[in-house]
Amino acid sequence: MKLSTFILNHLIDLGVDTIFGVPGDYNLRFLDYIEEEQRLKWVGTCNELNAAYAADGYGKINGLGVLVTTYGVGELSAMNGVAGAYAENVPLIHFVGMPSTSALQTGLPVHHSFGTGYFNEFTEMWTKISCATAQLSQTNWLVEIERVISTAIRKSKPAYIAIPADLFDMEVDDNIHLQFSRGSIGHEEQISQICDLIFENLQKSQMPVAWLGCNTRQFNAVELTSDLIESLNIPFAQTITAKSLYDESSDQYLGLYAGNFSPVDLVKQTFQKADCLIRIGVRITDFNSGGFSHKKFENIIDITDKVIRINGHYFVGVNTHKLLTTVVDKCRRDKIRFDNYLHYNRQTATKNSAPKDLSWSLNHFWDYTVSQIKPNDILLADAGTSFFGIWERNVTVKHLLLTQVLWSSIGYTLPAGLGASCADLSTRALVFIGDGAFQMTAQELSSIARLNLPVIVFLINNDGYTIERAIHGENAEYNDIAPWDYCKFAKALDNRINTHKVKTMEQYQQVLNLIDSNQSKHRTHLIELMFKRDDVPKMLTAAVKGMSKQNS
Amino acid sequence: MKLSTFILNHLIDLGVDTIFGVPGDYNLRFLDYIEEEQRLKWVGTCNELNAAYAADGYGKINGLGVLVTTYGVGELSAMNGVAGAYAENVPLIHFVGMPSTSALQTGLPVHHSFGTGYFNEFTEMWTKISCATAQLSQTNWLVEIERVISTAIRKSKPAYIAIPADLFDMEVDDNIHLQFSRGSIGHEEQISQICDLIFENLQKSQMPVAWLGCNTRQFNAVELTSDLIESLNIPFAQTITAKSLYDESSDQYLGLYAGNFSPVDLVKQTFQKADCLIRIGVRITDFNSGGFSHKKFENIIDITDKVIRINGHYFVGVNTHKLLTTVVDKCRRDKIRFDNYLHYNRQTATKNSAPKDLSWSLNHFWDYTVSQIKPNDILLADAGTSFFGIWERNVTVKHLLLTQVLWSSIGYTLPAGLGASCADLSTRALVFIGDGAFQMTAQELSSIARLNLPVIVFLINNDGYTIERAIHGENAEYNDIAPWDYCKFAKALDNRINTHKVKTMEQYQQVLNLIDSNQSKHRTHLIELMFKRDDVPKMLTAAVKGMSKQNS
């Protein structure tokens, strides 16, 4: 067996069926093996940044994304995309084809290098934005492949493997089986002690509330967390980053909590009144915490990966998954419920329904859109007016890729939509993206259409960098962008793309009906939505006040 | 005066009149100062990679390029572009707006960071691809600005300055004057000793030849080198990288020398016969040396920045500029000429003329194009079939940005054309780029048109990654790309762009005549040139043999 075959078999075992990237002469031999392998699909993108975003979108849904680039020029172009996966905890393996072993050994000044004879600079750069990095050699390849890939999966982060071009064809043994262990071992006694302390503090409370984040995915406890909250019967909110991870149709669900940015007053009020917080898998970032304006509880039970804080007590190195299992068991066994403490008024919670006022505005657009979303849809909302628009509303879908909440790289969602759609071909991917963001990565619409993917791009055309205008420089020229003809643009990339231009609610409803009636053989749509440039979500207005203050 | 004003005044003093970049909330305050400053133009690009390429193109012509991005997402997107400037020795200052001092001090998990409280990761990455890096603070700013900018200019490399957002408005003293010293001091005695040794070896030779590279720019000796060769009256060749730096219409000019890749046999033959090589400013890389097949001379005088090699003698730390001045003086004073040694046959050298055969092929396209190029044109040829097409032919123009020869990042020339054109508005910029490369950075055509720049894009449509096909995977699907409608694409970005589609020589001649007659108010043109996908320059065929061998 060749080394390439060994690697690809391993990726297939891990559930990968699509690989993203761009050809370059140092990786072409690897691509031969990918192209020959029937169980894998190669998706070449227009450039490497877009490939990284696509692998990220795929990895979020599939559980592992794979990216292939070439040495220097290719890998460096992908850096922002991979760093986003690092910030947002997406498992990703990035393979880079390097110059051949002999070129490395003699320090040849070959192209795509600095000509200095050093070949480690880029790998060293990757150590800052990867959980593990390796340069394979004839001797280290097995140990390094195991180490790097298992670390990426265990830590849910990107990892980097550079492979000299000659090694792709290297003969390796046929019968190698890699085993990965996940998670750490928990100590029964410690777990039981922490569990008791949790209930002790919880039962001191008259009015507890829960705040759930997305890091529960990292300790594989999304369902456990839902079970716990349901058993306790306490009201819960989510972080922005967790949006749609928990059941928004539950009677216990309050809405998003993000301190002063919280879009629904009820949520803020409930948090104000509450005397105890159970916080599970929450990552405190500027957006998540409403510019760090979240309520600081005296009685707090904070459960994160390996670190548990119960009021003044800290426990570090805990197997969080095991702890939560124990807590849920105890809760059910002892029937610990807070039925009496459900003081909040569910009736006032926002319900989504199509707007009655049919005038065209960003608010009405979002209201109507949310009413039309299908439970199986994959949703991607770009950093900017798009994610604020979604955050303000309740929506439960199969996969919501609202992120990157922390990394917030604009233009991310279009290539990520390509990747997400490749990972789940059974459903539609809806990409919400502003015009400024769209221009960053626009060419990737071409790859989406080429694969005839059921992706609908909602291009929010508000004439420039609206989120930047809201933060600073409302009328500054630097926030202007060139006014493209976006429908013509889409047609130029692929004439089969269905394009729609919308200026009124009536037109918008017609377009969505048309798409629903599914008459077109080609499944990719671009809807250009015209808005005034000062039409911004309420929540954005609240948030930018925080941002401005933070930057001064 | 504010810190921003101080920095901008300093850049203006250094001859900068245009700054490239993309807004982001951490740099918006800096952009305010740029927008207000009448002596500066802000050119916002569609994304940061393109901004870096544009700043590089501008820097190559202007002598210093300036790039502004935002923390994390912005700066990482620019990395490949800046690394290219590092590989190719382009002076560039990259300013990055960071989170505010207070966020850094308290380690706030703000957006565009990893939320870890560390803010040094990216600066550390930049140390690998910059000659100097700094994070400004309230105390270090003056020393660091001086150090970093002067280093960039002295080393002709990119440098990096990160500025916390609050410092842009910081009040600084009004009367600060920065002075830069360039180069090192040479020791008279050593210089004189080396000079003697050079002539001693030269005069042993019966048939010397010169090979000139582009690193003469680094020690500011392009003209000195030309003077020396003219005085000595010996035949000379250039490296690929130096293409068009020296006078190709000179009687002494042989052509490009690149070992086995050399496109003109006469050059190889002259090198074969010669018994002494004067090599000045030559950088041995895989392309430059013809896959390292260049002739290894016994009698060699190799003059590079600070390192001089004369046969077995090495002198390190020499002021090369001063040495060359001394050599030229001595040569003129003592009338040292090699008139008798001009054995080569000038008559057989390739002369450019319009082709007589008017059938449409890549070869005929290049022959005709070169015959139509004006001496003042700026030429940019992308890595791939484009630069090989130019290398095969003699052409002398005002600015030839053939590079990136070493870095070879495809897609570079379109944004670099934007930058180069901004640096010299008096003339046309001709961008030669393949379809695969074009798709990488295509959106930047929008910025070129928005500024109504006299840029003509020659889009060589040969249906995919032709250079990769030539190296490996001739019929592999991974070398296919989506077939865009490029003329429609250009019109979608900006309807004023003049578009032309060419399939025959007759059409091509008509288009060039039409452009020459200059009837359009809008000066940006896109010419889509249709070629067969296996129609590749001869020199590429020779080169890829070397590449394939190198990668195995």
Image (spheres, coloured by chain):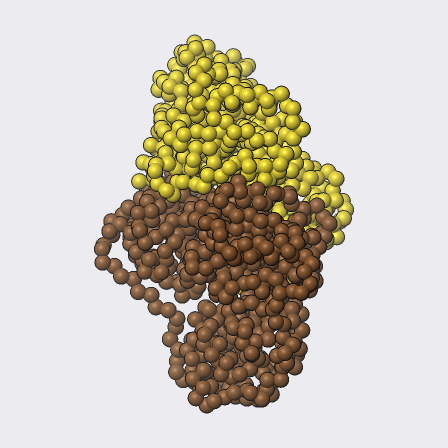
Chain colours: A yellow, B brown
- Classify the position of the C terminus of chain B by image quarter: bottom right
Up-down relation of residue A206 to residue B226 (above or below): above
Question: Which residue is outermost to the left?
Answer: B174
Indicate the position of residue A247 as horizontal and vertical percent values.
Answer: 53, 19
Q: Residue at x 29, y 62 (%)?
A: B178
Q: Residue at x 43, y 88 (%)?
A: B333
Q: Which residue is drawn at 53% across and 83% down?
A: B233
Tell me if B341 is positioned left or right of A10 in this view.
Answer: left
Up-down relation of residue B439 to residue A233 (above or below): below
Q: In which quarter of the image is residue A227?
A: top right
Visible residue check, residue A295: yes
Tell me if A477 is positioned left or right of A172 in this view.
Answer: left
Query: In the image shown, does B48 or B268 lie closer to the viewer?
Result: B268
Q: Residue at x 52, y 51 (%)?
A: B525
Up-down relation of residue A88 to residue B276 (above or below): above
Query: In the image shown, does B540 or B143 lie closer to the viewer?
Result: B540
Indicate the position of residue A120 as horizontal and vertical percent values.
Answer: 55, 57
Indicate the position of residue B232 as horizontal and vertical percent values.
Answer: 51, 84
Indicate the position of residue A494 as horizontal and vertical percent values.
Answer: 62, 38
Query: In the image shown, does A74 or B245 lie closer to the viewer?
Result: B245
